[in-house]
Image (cartoon, grey):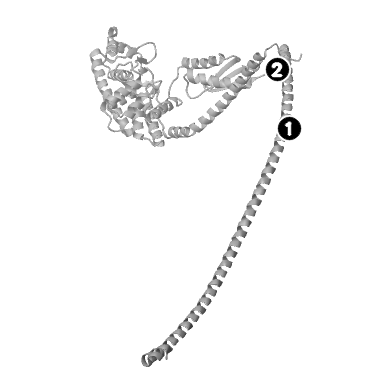
């Protein structure tokens, strides 16, 4: 039982004695509690002192470690600062040494520069003396020598430039014309045409000369009636078994020939009969012209062409140009144009149409001062032809600007047909004059002794003096002559210029 509870029970039961007992017990218990509290306080105090000491020791160690780290860092920074100061001092010393060396080098350079300036002055003096000596020896001043040298360099450069320019031009032509030549050759090979040459004079053959008197008639009335009805001049002369019909209009000449043939065959020749026969033959020719035009456009596959243009196409059969039948020429140009346009991926039908109509102005009934190309374009425009066809007709002789791709094709094919061997006549006088013009053009240049136009005017050989014309000048001369020919003359195809420079030494042993 708890002593306190026992003392309390004794107090209740025993009165005063119990009270003292209870107090004694309480006092003992209190002292025991106090001692126990003191013991516990001492224990706690000692524990706290130990903890405080441990914490103090830990903080002291931590402080010592931090101090060591700080000292170490300070030492490292101090070492770095010392090394930096040492490097800076070394750099300053090196710069001082470099400055001293630079000053020494500068002094040496100044000395060498002074020496070079002195040498330059000496060289200038020697150069001036040499120039004076050369001027005295050559009899020319320095400026004159410079001018001569510049002129010589210009001449050499001009010759080299001309040679290179010619090489470049030849190379460009070869490259640019390679495909064009291929197309043109293929076009020519694929097209074949008939050859027909007509003049402004027709010859009517008769069996005997007795017919001439009947054709002339009494006092010349029959021949006058024939000339009045046909518009053709009948030449009855001493030519055996022949009567010459002269007229620039081939249709009229054909009407006169057929009419005369019917009159001679029938035997009745008098003015009334002449007018009747000429009227019938004229009607027949007009029908034949229309039929020829229709047949031509059908053969070429051309559609929707106005009747007036078809009739004019038929009239081409009786017209010649430079000895070449106009209808055959136009058919040939049409086929060439269609082939070339097809090769180039263009409208072959439009090209064929323009090729057939390109010379339509030559057979016009209209009296006009316009060139035949422009007149043909005007006629085709009235007939409602397309704009590209009109431009091709009007521009094939460069009277107007080409605005369609068909135009250069028509021009090229027209030239191909005209330049074909046997296609056209060239007057002998014009041919000879062209050769003379070529030779005279070359003779105008200094140093040229002779010039010869050979190969029908397609090559010009120029002989020059070797002591007056150098090799480079010969190249330049060939180029200059070719440019003048292109700019000033009209010629078929191309003209090759060959400049020949040679030196001959001739001695005779006697």
Q: Nearer the viewer, residue 54 or 112?
A: 54
Q: Nearer the viewer, residue 103 or 41?
A: 41
Secondary structure under tag 1 reads helix
Farthest front residue in view: 16
Q: Position of residue 462 (x, y in %)?
A: 58, 19
Say above or below: 280 vs 217: below
Label 2: how many residues lie within 10 Å, few (<14), some (14-19) or many (20+)? Answer: few
336 to the left or right of 456: left
Say above or below: 385 vs 365: below
Q: Position of residue 220 (x, y in %)?
A: 29, 8
Disc 1 to disc 2, C-alpha distance: 72 Å
Label 1: how many residues lie within 10 Å, few (<14), some (14-19) or many (20+)? Answer: few
Q: Earlier in the sequence, mark 1 or mark 2?
A: 1
Q: How many marks?
A: 2
Q: Which mark is residue 104?
A: 1
Q: Position of residue 63 (x, y in %)?
A: 58, 62
Q: Identify the residue under disc 2.
A: 505
Can you see residue 288? no
181 to the left or right of 111: left
Q: Which mark is residue 175?
A: none
Say above or below: 110 vs 230: below
Secondary structure under tag 2 reads loop
Farthest right residue in view: 510
Q: Quadrant of residue 207?
A: top left
369 to the left or right of 456: left
Give the residue displayed 42% in from the left and 91% down from the top. Answer: 1
Q: Quadrant of the C terminus?
A: top right
Q: Position of residue 204 (x, y in %)?
A: 35, 18
Give the residue displayed 67% in from the left and 19% down from the top. Answer: 503
Say above or below: 261 vs 294: above
């Amino acid at each position: 039982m708890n002593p306190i509870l026992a003392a309390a029970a004794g107090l209740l039961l025993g009165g005063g004695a119990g009270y003292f007992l209870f107090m004694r017990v309480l006092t003992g218990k209190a002292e025991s509690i106090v001692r126990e509290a003191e013991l516990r306080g001492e224990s706690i105090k000692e524990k706290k002192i130990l903890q405080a000491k441990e914490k103090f020791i830990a903080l002291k160690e931590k402080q010592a470690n931090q101090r060591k780290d700080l000292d170490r860092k300070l030492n490292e920074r101090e070492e770095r600062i010392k090394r930096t100061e040492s490097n800076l001092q070394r750099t300053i010393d090196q710069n001082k040494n470099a400055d001293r060396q630079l000053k020494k080098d500068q002094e040496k350079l100044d000395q060498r520069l002074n020496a070079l300036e002195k040498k330059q002055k000496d060289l200038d003096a020697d150069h001036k003396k040499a120039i004076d000596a050369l001027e005295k020896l050559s009899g020319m001043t320095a400026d004159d020598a410079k001018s001569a040298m510049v002129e010589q360099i210009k001449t050499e450069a001009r010759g080299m430039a001309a040679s290179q320019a010619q090489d470049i031009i030849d190379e460009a032509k070869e490259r640019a014309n390679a495909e064009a030549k291929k197309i043109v050759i293929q076009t020519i090979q694929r097209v074949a045409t008939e050859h027909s040459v007509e003049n402004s004079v027709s010859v009517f053959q008769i069996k005997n000369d007795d017919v001439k008197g009947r054709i002339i008639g009494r006092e010349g009335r029959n021949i006058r009636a024939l000339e009045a009805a046909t518009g053709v001049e009948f030449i009855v002369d001493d030519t055996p078994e022949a009567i010459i019909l002269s007229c620039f209009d081939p249709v009229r000449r054909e009407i006169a020939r057929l009419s005369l043939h019917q009159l001679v065959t029938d035997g009745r020749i008098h003015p009334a009969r002449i007018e009747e026969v000429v009227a019938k033959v004229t009607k027949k020719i007009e029908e034949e012209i229309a039929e020829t035009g229709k047949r031509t456009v059908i053969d070429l596959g051309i559609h929707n062409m106005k009747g007036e243009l078809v009739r004019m196409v038929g009239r081409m059969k009786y017209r010649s140009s430079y000895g070449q039948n106009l209808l055959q020429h136009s058919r040939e140009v049409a086929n060439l144009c269609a082939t070339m346009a097809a090769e180039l991926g263009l409208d072959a039908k439009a090209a064929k149409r323009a090729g057939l109509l390109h010379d339509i102005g030559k057979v016009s009934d209209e009296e006009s001062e316009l060139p035949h190309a422009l007149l043909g374009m005007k006629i085709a425009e009235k007939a409602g032809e397309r704009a590209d066809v009109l431009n091709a007709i009007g521009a094939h002789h460069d009277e107007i600007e080409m605005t369609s791709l068909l135009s250069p094709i028509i021009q090229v094919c027209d030239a191909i047909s005209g330049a074909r061997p046997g296609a056209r006549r060239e007057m002998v006088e014009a041919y000879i004059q062209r050769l003379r013009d070529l030779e005279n053009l070359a003779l105008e240049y200094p140093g040229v002794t002779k010039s010869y136009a050979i190969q029908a005017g397609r090559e010009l050989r120029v002989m020059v003096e070797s002591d007056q014309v150098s090799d480079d000048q010969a190249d330049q001369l060939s180029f200059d002559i070719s440019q003048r020919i292109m700019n000033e003359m009209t010629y078929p195809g191309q003209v090759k210029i060959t400049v020949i420079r040679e030196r001959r030494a001739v001695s005779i042993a006697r």
